[in-house]
Image: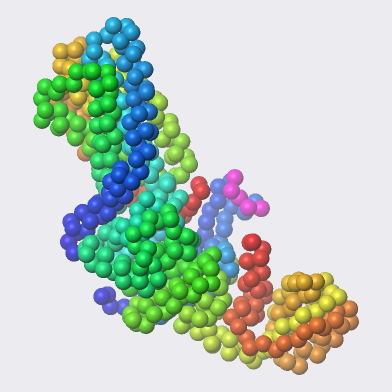
Amino acid sequence: MASYDLAVKTEGLTRIFRLRKREARDGAREILALDRVTLEVQRGELFGLLGPNGAGKTTLIKILATLLLPTSGRAYVAGIDVVENPVEVRRHINMVVGGETSGYGLLTVEENLWMFAQFYGIPSREARRRILELLALVGMADRAKTKVYHLSSGMRQKMNIVRGFLTNPEILFLDEPTLGLDVQTARTIREFVRRWLEEHPDRTILLTTHYMHEADELCDRVAIIDRGRILACAAPWELKTALRQEAVFRLRVEGIADAKAALDGMPEIRALAQHAEDGQLLLDLVLASEEALVSVLARLSASGARLAELRKEEPTLEDVFLALVGRKLTEDQDEHS
Amino acid sequence: MSTVKHFLRTVVGRAYPRLVGVWREKSWLIFDVLFPLLQVSAYVYIYRAIGAPPEFSGFAILGGATIAYWMNVLWSMASQLYWEKETGNLQLYLLAPTSRMAILLGMALGGLTATTVRAAGVILVGALLFRVPLQVSHGALFLGVFLLTLVALYGLGMLLSSVFLLWGREAWHLSNLFMEPVYLLAGFYFPVRALGLGLALAASVIPITLGLDALRQLLYPQLMENFRVLPVEAEMGVLAGLAVLFVFLARGGLRFFENLARREGRLTLRGQ
């Protein structure tokens, strides 16, 4: 195995997509997908990239996986420059993308996986042994001979996961691996990933997700990315601890349509997100201190709001994101859906 | 593992879905044997109606069989990477630490073998149905010309497929454009010399033109004396040259278009 300490290293990585005239958005002919991203992922780490859709997660993964060139900056995978020597990088990596529809429907699960194993030069007998072993681990041992077009999307994604791990890569990129899956399937995949890393402690996984609990549950460290920029990078507990000095509250209020307008200009509010539910307004508040709550409640009351519920919360990654970005991650999901 | 072994594993791996498809998706019997025979029948009846020698029906049947290869090259070689991009396979192929040429070669060999089954079906059913004389005078030479034609043809397919790394729908239109005009220029249903020597020579850039002409010369030597474009040996020389040229260009094209697509971000862009 290659000798290197950092599985992934980027220095000022920038990617600009230039649009054709007819593709221009609001007159803009360029999209800044990554903005001077500098990152280090240690070998043996499960590193998470957390951010909303369009934050730049997939762009970063594609550059690291040698499928896309950066506009500027450098990126190294397993100590190898992805621009200078992509062929060598590919010997160390594999990738699984959420919602992937790869493979051929006419082939069975086992045949599809065998085919991809051949591209990595794995002898047939060894490939079949690994395939059956991994299929059993994701609960698909009885589906080895099933044609792929008979699989549900969850089963198909499990097959893709097996494809990624089949080559026993030193560095694995998982791009939204549980995207759109039911709770049970997503849990199976997360458990599988965790177990695999326990059994292969020298392997590295770079996971992108917009599911907070997934990042929280799986990752050793998390980088929060938004609009192409890394806003914070630390272990989930560190990010949350940093926020503990502040105060996180959840409020449910009635009789008011827009709390943001009512609370506008209050310096003690670090971040605020709101959304309507069952005729009430749910507020997520990050305050500079607990004492600030009094003035917030007074301002709400003066605006005609009635307090229906008040809870002080332990900070989550969602709150970290809110404090850093000024909006909730789920707001982006709502907008997209 | 040696590079050669890895290369061969990739070829076999990529050829496999196509070979398996022959047995698992039998609809080809209708679409790739019966339907082409309808077109062949039209020409056979025309030749019969004007009292042409029965060998002319043989021209049409041979042409009908080779159309299967041209269709395979256009839609399952050249355009294949477009589909692979749409399904997400392409990025996995490119991600793999293997030769792109091995993947294309696997695609070609798988397609070629599967198409040979289809082409044999057209010839067999056509010859039996229309009682056409098919007597090969020089078996080894016939096989040689046939294989050389396929190598040059699939070399062209590999070259065209590299274009699809960058373009999507645009290249798709290119494939459409190559269908009907090539049917005419390659002389699928008639000796291409009928177009005039100049045009026939110009059309020789399509490997199937000279390949078909040489095969017809070997099948019907006397009749083709008046219709041949070039002597068989010369046609084989040109075909060998085209085979080397196309495979060489495909190799360079793959590298060039892959880099360009990586730079422009089009390698994994779907719905283009």
| Res A299 → quadrant | bottom right
Residue B147 part of the magenta-drawn span:
no
Residue A131, quarter of the rendered image = bottom left
* Residue shown at the point (89%, 78%) measured from the top left: A304
Relative placement, left or right, of A156 versus B17 is right
Name which residue lies at 28% across and 23% down.
B126
Query: Can you give x and y, in whole percent of width and height, for residue B76 in the image?
Result: 36, 41
Residue at figure coordinates x 37%, y 73% from the top left: A137
Q: The N terminus of chain A lies in which quarter of the figure?
A: bottom left
| Residue lying at the far top of the rendered structure | B51
Query: Is the C terminus of chain A in the top left, top right, bottom left or bottom right quadrant?
Result: bottom right
Provide the major secondary structure of the magenta segment: loop
- The x, y position of residue B51, in whole percent, is 28, 6
Magenta span covers which residues? A22-26
Residue A309, x across and y down, in percent: 77, 84
Query: Eyeballing the image, is A189 above or below A239?
Result: above
Report how many numbered discs are placed on residues in the image.
0
